[in-house]
Amino acid sequence: MTEPNHLLENIKTAEEGRPNSLRAEEKELISEVKQIYRARIKVNCTACKYCLPCPAGVNIPRALSYLNDVSMLGNVKNASFQYGVLLSPEERAGNCIECGECEKVCPQKLSIRESLKEITELFEK
């Protein structure tokens, strides 16, 4: 939404929506799209932030989100630009000291250190 009329249009659409109003074909399409997105997610990080604060200052959830952006959208150039601009040098994956503290508290039991190495190779080399 970039204009006030977009908001009004969305409100109108939401007000007109009714439970069980989607047709079977629409539900199937939504299910297919959901499966495609899930298959493309590289790291199943929920950004719960249990891994923070990182002793080395790495913004782990945000770094992982850029890896997922590349995996899902295939646009390395855009993700690399955002990584370089939106993360401060102190927050970048290359600062990881591989202490493993993040993995000890990650509810998803992610291999965070390996992902941070991949992010470093992808965006910092």
Image (cartoon, grey):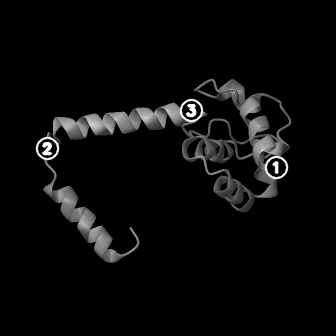
Label 3, residues with CA under 10 Å away: few <14, some 14-19, many ≥20: few
> Label 2's element?
loop
Q: Position of residue 85 (x, y in %)?
A: 72, 62
In three-dimensional space, the C-alpha distance between marks 1 and 3, rounded to whole angstroms, equals 22 Å
> Label 3's element?
loop
- Asked whether, in this view, residue 71 is left or right of residue 52, the answer is left
In three-dimensional space, the C-alpha distance between marks 3 and 2, rounded to whole angstroms, equals 31 Å
Which label is found at residue 124?
A: 1
Which label is found at residue 57?
A: none
Q: Position of residue 30 (x, y in %)?
A: 31, 39
95 vs 102, nearest the viewer: 95
32 shown above or below 14: above
Q: Residue at x 38, y 39 (%)?
A: 33
Q: Position of residue 81 (x, y in %)?
A: 70, 59
Q: Say which amino acid is labelled 1.
A: Glu
Q: Residue at x 67, y 50 (%)?
A: 76
Q: Which residue is mark 3?
A: 44
First along the sequence among labels 1 and 2: 2
- Asked whether, in this view, residue 106 is left or right of residue 96, the answer is left
Quadrant of the rendered image containing residue 14: bottom left
107 vs 28, nearest the viewer: 28
Q: Which residue is mark 2?
A: 21
